[in-house]
Image (cartoon, grey):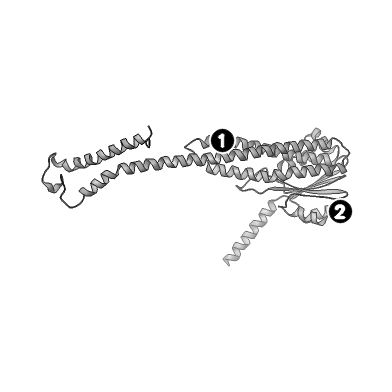
Amino acid sequence: MRKGFIANRLRSHKKSEEDTIENKIETIQGEKFVWTDLQNPDRSDVEKLAEKYHFNALNIEDCMTKFELPKLDSYNDHFFVILQFPPLAQKTGISKNSQLSIFVGKDFLVTVHQGDLGPLVELVNICKTNSDPHRKERLLGKSSGLLLHEIIDVLVDDLLHTSRKIIANLDEIEDGVFDERKSVARSIALLRREINRLRRIVNPLKKFVTEIAKNVKKFSEDEELVLYYDDVIDHIDKIIETLEESRETMEIYKDTDFVLSTEKTNKVLAVLTIIFTLAIPSTVIGTFYGMNVNLPGGIGSGSLILGPFTVFIIIIIASAIPAILMFAYFKKLGWISS
């Protein structure tokens, strides 16, 4: 009975979470084309557009799969491309990439995503609300190829900002690596993971943007459009260069942190070893005088030259002399630094 109640609660909780995911379909009319943006779409929504524009059924399957590898399929009247980008907001420590599926034709542009690409959502809002008329005219005034360039450009710029944040984090880690009071091993590991994740996104992105620039010529009469895409590729090259330099720097910081941590550990072990070594004479002598046998200067010897503290004084002197000699010897060898 209780198990059934818990199962019902879990199903209702899951349903409430699904209900909070807003399904948006925005259709924006441009000068020569129509832009349809789908956020968190149902299969029926995509299939309706597929019937209207004659999309391939396999592309629809890829479009509805949230984590598909980047790809580009070209047809006579349109082409289909899947790109991967990091989400703008990361609610969890380990975030998955955001997928953007795009159908591009001469008189239409269809974008399908989960609504977590902030720059793209902002472009949709600008075109919908007319909050920035000048930019809206630039987005919708020419061709679908130019709008596609603007979408990719803002997403790549967001990647560029992310790479700059990585450089800022590198500066913080550098300060922490040489600060003995801080432990930066976890920070180094997390930033290395972030760099590798971005590299897996950006490296294929250059290839597919180049392919998009070749295919978009069929649907645009603007000769300068190729130059626009070349500018995006230049930004991608900067991101790749930044990530490679950051990766190399992280390897240096990782090795440096390991060396410094090992040196710090060795220093602690050296101090503890020296303390233990200097305590050996007193431990040995104290062990002998703790036995129930008669020893010179002991209680049973009957000779108390220095009064009732004779045994104590003898033990202190016998322990201090070898400890002092060992300390001087270690100092001479350089094992104990000033």
Q: CA distance from mark 1 to mark 2?
A: 52 Å
- Name the residue beneath numbered marker 1: 172
Quadrant where the C terminus is found in the figure:
top left
How packed is label 2: few (under 14 Cα within 10 Å), some, or many (20 or more)? few
Whether residue 150 is visible here, answered yes or no, is yes
x and y percentages locating residue 230 in the rendered image: 78, 37
Residue 72 placement, left or right of 264? right
Residue 177's x, y, as percent? 52, 37
Q: Which mark is residue 318?
A: none
Label 2: which residue? 54
Is residue 42 visible in this depiction of the protein? Answer: no
Amino acid at circle 1: Glu
Name the amino acid type tagged 2. Answer: His
In this view of the protein, which residue sits in the foreground, 279 or 201?
279
- What is the tally of numbered marks visible in this picture? 2
Residue at (81, 32) in percent of width and height: 134
Q: Earlier in the sequence, mark 1 or mark 2?
A: 2
Question: Residue 286, percent across and down?
Answer: 23, 46
Residue that lies at the very extreme toward the front in this rendered image:
333
Where 88 falls versus 133 (above or below)?
A: below
- Along the line of sight, the residue nearer the viewer: 175 or 55: 175
In this rendering, the label closer to the viewer, 1 or 2? 1
Which quarter of the figure is the N terminus placed in? bottom right
- Going 80% across and 56% down the picture, which residue do you hit? 58
The kind of secondary structure element at disc 1 is helix
Give the residue displayed 57% in from the left and 65% down from the top: 2
In terms of secondary structure, where does tag 2 sit?
loop
